Image (cartoon, helix red, strand yellow):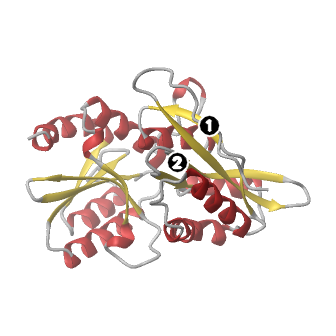
Amino acid sequence: MMMEIPPPAPLSTEDDKSFVYYVLRYVPNLVRDEWVNIGVLVFDPRTNERRFRLIEDEDEFHRIRRLHPDADEGLLRALQGSLESRLEAANLASRNVSEWESILFKWDSQLSNSLQLAPPAGSLGADLDSEAERLYADRIAVPRLPKGVGLAGSRGYLRNYCSQVFRSAHLWDRLQKRVRAEIFTFPGDPMRLDYSYRRNGTRGFVQTLSVSRAPADAKLLAYTAKHILDKNQFASEFTAVTDVPLQSGNDRHRFVRETLKEFNIEPVPQEGFAVWVAKLRPMLLQ
């Protein structure tokens, strides 16, 4: 039977919008009927825009390994590019809701036995990007500690903080979020750049970087920055928001700093990010 998209929920305020979302589940053992949520697809019925988020932080993969030691991690890590390609190939430009329903039904039937789409549900939010982030945090990300402390130092924690700062500075709508690295590197590259902006002919990129948990990610960012600089004509600037200030006496910190420095990637510690955004703001609002 074809899945039915629920009707948009009534708006709670004049600014809220109605969305439809699907949670993607990983089912390592069909017999036991146990699953773990690994992604969320959020759809705007009015515009046919969608946002798709899959697990990507090491904390999230560690949680799956702990819950399901025999999980196919290779499959999970390759999903982002594969499923994004399927969605693009489905030609989501149509504004026909019944056609969207048909696409999702076909997509669900073609997923591997280990992957399942949960029934669709409705939600309300200010915009598609923020609602996708909220749903991901609520239903997919590693649960936060009590009192909203969160997993300090993780990229998810850093992204949440950066998003709050950008919104407070009224720059959220001027940013492109989760930019595909494969645009600048090679098809199939699963990396996403957290934020991008344009100012005076320059394109800027902002990426969160957990020095405490994954310092090697600095090499991935440097590799991507190199390809952006080599393959594109526009001027570019790069910023890495780190969970801790980089200390000169710390070998790990020195590695990160020198790796970023090679491609003129500016490290900005989380504690200084609000000040950095305050300096950027007038340049983006010109």
Q: Gap between marks 1 and 2, in whole Å? A: 12 Å
Instruction: Work out which residue is located at the far top of the displayed protein and give it.
Output: 13
**What x and y, as percent, mark residue 132?**
50, 43
Q: Amino acid at mark 1?
A: Pro
Q: Which residue is mark 1?
A: 7
Q: Amino acid at mark 2?
A: Phe
**What x and y, as percent, mark residue 227?**
27, 75
Q: Which residue is mark 2?
A: 43
Q: On the image, which quarter does residue 207 sit in?
A: bottom left
Tell which circle, 1 or 2, labels the residue nearer the N-terminal end. Answer: 1
- Residue 252 is marked as none
Q: Is residue 12 left or right of residue 106?
A: left
Dot 1 lies on which element? Answer: loop
Q: Is residue 154 visible?
A: no
- At 41% from the left and 37% from the top, the residue drawn is 127
Residue 261 vertical placement versus 15 (above, below): below
- At 44% from the left and 73% from the top, the residue drawn is 189
Dot 2 lies on which element? Answer: strand
